Image: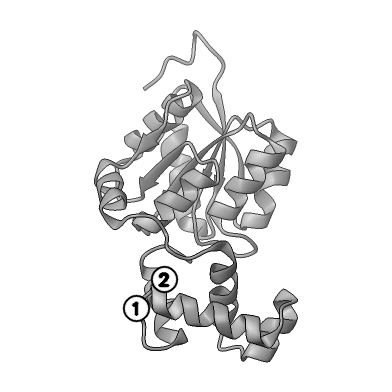
Amino acid sequence: MGNAENSPSIRVLLAEDQGMVREALAALLGLEGDIDVVAQVGRGDEVVAAVLANDVQVAVLDIEMPGMTGIEAAAELHRQAPGTKVVIATTFGRPGYLRRAMESGADAFLVKDAPASELAEAIRRVLRGERVIDPALAAAALAEGANPLTARERDVLGAAADGAVNADIARRLHLSEGTVRNYLSMAIQKTEARNRTEAVRIAREKGWL
């Protein structure tokens, strides 16, 4: 535990869509003498406003949340509240997620099965300017290599995930149908999939999408 007497508590936001998990994390972090959970949200698109309203120093974000993913929220925080440190704590220890989180400006990436004491220590360390990454995941990310999909290929593949036809995807992303077909073809090729459905599954499993 840190020493709360010598310095003010670290102001933390928790973003997690599962209420019981969020409350349990808040309770565990509340046992640390130097950490104060000042805000909790259940949606990714509520993160930035809550951080700005509560003078948050460290935001602890889940990845899969409604409204906006934790990775997207990290990128928004990097733009709108660059002084706020970001810790990604996720159930999904996928190498592609780690790479995307770091590219989005996250300072730490932890898997949720780690002890709460590790999360507390990560919060302290990022505030000191350190980066904290789950070592097994870091090794896996290096072995996996970079995400082969371009940003536009990810956009198109993501838009196809709900079964949308090319015409719908084209309208949604303001592209021609031919361009959509080309991007999907490249994504299928790069993921070594047989079709777009399999390409979506593979990309999600690797954390590329």
For residue 102, side relative to residue 164 (left or right) = left
The three-letter amino acid code for the residue at tag 2 is Ala
Query: Residue 18: percent from the left, percent from the top?
Result: 50, 60
Judging by the rendered image, the residue that carries numbered circle 2 is 203
Q: Secondary structure at mark 1?
A: loop
For residue 201, side relative to residue 142 (left or right) = right
Query: Residue 23: percent from the left, percent from the top?
Result: 49, 49
Give the residue displayed 48% in from the left and 48% down from the top. Answer: 101
Colour mapping: one colour
Q: Which quadrant of the figure contains the N terminus?
A: top left
Query: Residue 192: percent from the left, percent from the top?
Result: 34, 78
Tell me, yes or no, if residue 91 can be seen here.
no
Nearer to us: label 2 or label 1:
1
Check the image and name the residue furthest to the top.
Answer: 6
Rendered view: 146 above or below 11 = below
For residue 2, side relative to residue 50 (left or right) = left
Judging by the rendered image, the residue that carries numbered circle 1 is 192
The three-letter amino acid code for the residue at tag 1 is Glu
* 3D distance between C-alphas at marks 2 and 1: 10 Å
